[in-house]
Image (cartoon, rainbow, N blue to C red):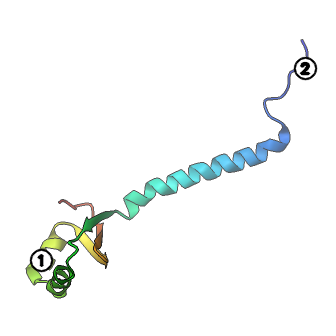
Amino acid sequence: MANSAPLTERRYVAPFVLITSLFFLWAFGVNLNDILIPRFKNAFALSDFQSLIAEYKKYHEKIWPEITWSIKNSGIEDMEIYCLGTRMFMIMEVNEGFFF
């Protein structure tokens, strides 16, 4: 029987092992991200009327204690709302008891 060629040359083994290991480490970290830092993101389109956007911002400057209690009771630990023009972005950090 003739000499068969090796499956891969020896010089490619180390880079192959390194890249394969890094890929699995990256995938492991990405999958843990959802478990360790659960965040829910949402984007909203607001009306283009500047007066309504200003009214929305003024209305939400000080929230009622009942709203804060309701937010905390639903499992939301932290909430951030950003407004850029007519787009509003909401990011919520939640615990395992979160429900909508």
Question: Residue 32's image quarter?
Answer: bottom left
**Residue 48 placement, left or right of 5:** left
Label 1 Cα crowd, 10 Å radius (few <14 / some 14-19 / many 20+): few
Between 58 and 92, the residue placed more toward the observer is 58
Residue on which disc 2 sits: 3
Tell me the residue at 17%/66% (across/down).
74
The residues tagged by marks 1 and 2 sit, at their Cα atoms, a distance apart of 77 Å
Compared with 52, 15 (above or below) is above
Residue on which disc 1 sits: 67
Helix, strand or loop at disc 1? helix
Residue 54 in the image, given as x and y percentages of width and height? 20, 85
Sequence-wise first label, 1 or 2? 2
**Which residue appears farthest toward the left when viewing the image?**
66
Compared with 35, 66 (above or below) is below
Pointer 1 with pointer 2, Cβ within 8 A: no
Helix, strand or loop at disc 2? loop
- Image quadrant in which the N terminus is located: top right
Tell me the residue at 25%/67% (across/down).
45
Label 2 Cα crowd, 10 Å radius (few <14 / some 14-19 / many 20+): few
**Which residue appears farthest toward the top when viewing the image?**
1
Tell me the residue at 71%/46% (across/down).
17
| Amino acid on which disc 2 is placed | Asn
- Image quadrant in which the C terminus is located: bottom left
Compared with 76, 63 (above or below) is below
Tell me the residue at 52%/51% (across/down).
27
Question: Residue 6's image quarter?
Answer: top right
**Residue 72 placement, left or right of 86:** left
